[in-house]
Amino acid sequence: MPRAGEPSTTHDMRLVSLPSAISLLRVPFAALFLAVDGPAIRAAILAAAAASDFADGWLARRLGQTTRAGELLDPLTDKVFLVAALVSFALNGRLAPWQLLVLLGRDLFAIAAFLTVVVFALPIRFRARLGGKIVTAVQLAAVLVLLVRPEWIGPLLVIAAVTGTYAVLDYTRAGLRALRGAERHG
């Protein structure tokens, strides 16, 4: 039981919480991003999606509403928004398929890792790590650049490749540590 003033961490799968509701906003933001035209309105939607990504995590920690559902919902809704936005740029020719793969490489790894954990019932929890947060920030920056200065995407692709590789290695190392810890305690 937490002391007065300390947030508690719950481990239920409850979806109905303010942080989870804020995370879920990124799904309609993704649809809206696809439905509208014009860089200004799309940039405003991007800003709202980015703000919701910051707000949900901050509120979850502040209100003591960190849940397993939130641990899954937050990155999932990030992916929905970012994949929708980036694929829209690939479809309209602003991003080549290989550039899309560079920007989404870490996400493809995360999906494969998640499916592996589920299929093999591995004792690994997916928690946000600094590398993943940096990749998400780079992806958000890439969407903004593609909206206002698509010719500047080159340097962001290099940054995405480097940070994505770091995140994949960091998550892999953390997952292997969790497996070794489970073996010792199991």
Image (spheres, rainbow, N blue to C red):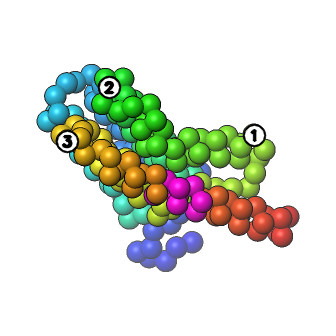
Local secondary structure at mark 1: helix
Residue highlighted by disc 1: 119
Asked whether, in this view, residue 12 is left or right of residue 23, the answer is right
Query: Residue 40 at x, y = what percent?
Result: 14, 36
The secondary structure type at the circle numbered 3 is loop
**What main secondary structure does the magenta stretch of the protein show?**
helix
Give the residue number, with chain letter if any, for mark 2: 93
Q: Earlier in the sequence, mark 2 or mark 3?
A: 2
Label 2, label 3: how far apart the Cα atoms are: 14 Å
Q: Position of residue 121 (x, y in %)?
A: 77, 46
Identify the image quadrant of the N terminus: bottom right
Q: Is residue 40 left or right of residue 94?
A: left
Is residue 149 visible to the viewer in this orientation of the structure? Answer: yes
Tell whether label 3 touches label 2 (CB within 8 Å).
no
**Magenta-colored stretch includes residue 46:** no
Mark 2 secondary-structure assignment: loop
Residue 90, by quadrant, is: top left
Q: Mark 3 sits on what residue?
A: 149
Q: Residues within 10 Å of mark 2 (few under 14, many from 20)?
A: few
* Percent of width and height locating residue 49: 30, 43
Quadrant hosting residue 125 = bottom right
The image shows a total of numbered marks equal to: 3
Residue span colored magenta: 163-170
